[in-house]
Image (tube, grey):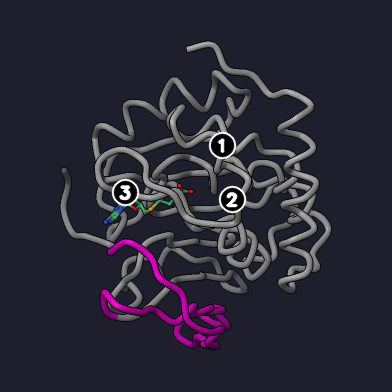
Amino acid sequence: MNRSDEYIHQGQRVRLVEIIRQKGISNEAVLNAIGAVPRHLFMEDYLEHRAYDDEALPINAGQTISQPYTVAFQTELLDVKSFDKVLEVGTGSGYQAAVLAEVGARVYSIERQKELYAHLLYFLPSIGYKKVQCFYGDGYKGLPKYGPFDSIIITAGAPSIPEDLLTQLRIGGRLVCPVGDRNVQIMTRVIRLTETDFETKEFGNFLFVPLLKGLN
Ligand code: SAH
């Protein structure tokens, strides 16, 4: 495989950024990140021609790379500041992790599918995302040793917000999680106001692959 980021891809990304802007994303740092990450490298060759369509696509292990609009939407809700420590649950293709790195986050990302994790370990550094820290584990449990986090993003649909993750959020920190059953999830943002108080707000319907317990 000999793949690179060419002018044609860069041009396709300019178009993708405009589509996402028209759909309502206004945070310029987030739009710049979508314009910077070479999404075609995160999928198999046969899908490359669809890499800059605004849609979710299949990756290995029966999982998906999220739709660029959804990645931008979740990233905007997180309101990441440079050097924020961000936990991602569900590394998948690594695309969302790369977008977080582009907006300046220190990224810690967990994946429960060993095959995906093993690929990410060499793939992300190979395209320049050397500081993203990947972990093989059950995201329901988070990474207690590395917390508290400035923000936490869950990129799979959960029946409810995992309790362990709320405890790993710093006070003032934000967690963004799609919550629902397998048919539909509501994008939910939780802000930790104090040790025990959380403010929850909902942001419309989305569809993700499920957040599963245990390892694979
Ligand atoms: N953020 C990814 C989206 C991947 S889809 C991207 O940008 O491509 C969701 C991912 O969550 C899948 O790879 C799935 O294996 C993973 N996942 C599901 N349940 C999990 C859990 N409990 N812990 C960690 N990862 C999980």
- The answer to whether residue 36 is left or right of residue 117 is right
Amino acid type, mark 3: Gln
Looking at the image, is mark 3 or mark 2 earlier in the sequence?
Answer: 3
| Element on which disc 3 rests | loop
Q: CA distance from mark 3 to mark 2?
A: 25 Å
Amino acid type, mark 1: His
Would you place residue 191 above or below residue 94 in this image?
below
Mark 3 nearby-residue class (10 Å; few <14, some 14–19, many ≥20) = some
- The answer to whether residue 86 is left or right of residue 179 is right
Q: Which residues are magenta?
A: 181-210
Taking the spot 49% from the left edge, 66% from the top edge, the residue there is 169
Taking the spot 37% from the left edge, 46% from the top edge, the residue there is 58
Q: Percent x, y for residue 179?
A: 37, 78
Would you place residue 95 above or below residue 197 in this image?
above
Would you place residue 134 above or below residue 145 in this image?
above
- Depth check, front residue: 97 or 31: 31
Identify residue for label 3. 63
